[in-house]
Image: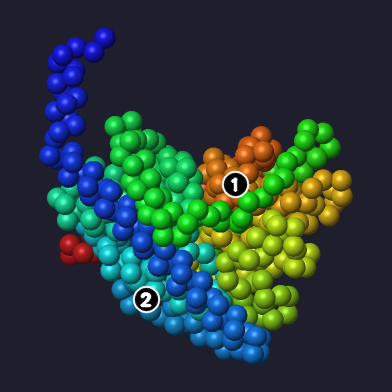
Amino acid sequence: MPTPATHKSGLALLLSGEQWKRRLALWGGGVAVALAAIVFAKASDAAFSVFRDVLAVSPLWALLLTPATFALLAWVTTRGLQTTRGSGIPQVIAGLDLPDGWRRRNLSLRVAVSKMTLTVLGLLGGASIGREGPTVHVGAAIMHSLGARFGFRDPQQGARFLLAGGAAGIAAAFNTPLAGVVFAIEELSGAFEHQFSGTLLTAVIVGGVVSLGLLGNYTYFGTVSTALPLGQGWLAVLACGLLCGLAGGVFSRLLLLAMEGRPRWLGAWRARHPVLLAGACGLVLALLGITLGAGAFGTGYAQARELLQGHAAVGESFGIVKFAANLVSYLAGIPGGLFSPALAVGAGLGHNVATLLPGVDPTAVVLLGMCGYLTGVTQAPLTSAVISMELTDNSDMLLPILATVLLARGASALVCHTPVYKALALRLLAAEPAITAKETT
């Protein structure tokens, strides 16, 4: 039973000025991250809407606008903004283990603003990128900067603020609070501190309340009413788990090989002419969009939502085209994330699988394709499962989704042995000693 001493220590902890200062910093950070995520989402949607309007005049405009935007972004990111490249999640993961000096350079408010601006510019040019990963980067940067201003500058406290900011970022980006917490546990830290669990939950909840108050209670992909009874329909679980998981693993493997400079000609081109390479990637994306469908451009959100709602307006090649569009966009080395485009690829592949299973609800198969492919790319099965359920407000698919992500995780690991975000973070960690040595000479 609790002793009087235990009650006194608990009361002292509750009334501690240091504890309340930390709570206020995290609650304020949750509000700030939610507001930043809302502004980011609105600006991203507006930017891509402008691109669609340009394509409506003539699709050939993409041949000029997309390569020029990619080249401009590559040029800008070589001028002191290298850390804004990619999704930003690897930077947050690496930041949990790197010193405060690295965090100040790579997770500052300047980087956060630049990340949002450049990602919006990428969508203005039609890049096949998402804003969710960048929102994690932005959320971590905002929370870390706010924590430092409140005096929490030691490495352990800084890592906690990064973790809370990243979780709040993914929760605000998708309006999925539970996914934010699971993402922090599974993807960002790989572990969870019991002492920090309540604080992290509170920061995510505060951000979620702000988002809910400003945007209303909405579901990212709308409410999806579907189920998959035991029986023949579970062939979809096997197909989506293995095929979509394997496809996601192939995507991650190709991406990591390119980051390692393979094939050699690509690595040499990236090192010597990054702006030219980015422009070439933009040209390839423009050609994909013009010849194979405008779904190659942007996040793919609209197409994935249509597939989930049973109003498919895409061809059978959409999943493969989006796969290629995502790959060339990431190879360009521009800012932008993988989450939304990965969900779109998974929806397209699930749509393909559904045509082979005429007796199964195609909406259910599309949903399984989404969670299977996202798991294959990230190798984060719990995050993928929770996101898929929260994005569609569907709990009836719990068991099929869990089975699918389990199979997809195993299939992905056959071709990509290290999860993509972890592998990219390890590259940053390996480069840090060399950067520190260079700075001190």
* Circle 2 residues within 10 Å: few <14, some 14–19, many ≥20: few
Going 30% across and 62% down the picture, which residue do you hit?
106
Tell me if 160 is positioned left or right of 282 in this view: left
Residue 202, percent across and down?
33, 42
Q: Which residue is mark 2?
A: 78
Give the position of the C terminus as an image quadrant. bottom left
Q: Is residue 370 visible?
A: yes
Q: Secondary structure at mark 1?
A: loop
- The residue closer to the viewer here, 439 or 196, is 196
Nearer to us of marks 2 and 1 is 1
Q: How many marks?
A: 2
Q: Earlier in the sequence, mark 2 or mark 1?
A: 2
- The residue closer to the viewer here, 1 or 273, is 1
* Circle 1 residues within 10 Å: few <14, some 14–19, many ≥20: some
**Vertical comparison of 36 with 218: above or below:** below
Residue 147, percent across and down?
22, 52
Going 84% across and 37% down the picture, which residue do you hit?
232
**Vertical comparison of 166 with 277: above or below:** above
- The residue closer to the viewer here, 41 or 405, is 41
Residue 319, percent across and down?
70, 62
Q: Is residue 405 visible?
A: no
Residue 310, percent across and down?
75, 58
Q: Which residue is mark 1?
A: 393
Give the position of the N terminus as an image quadrant. top left
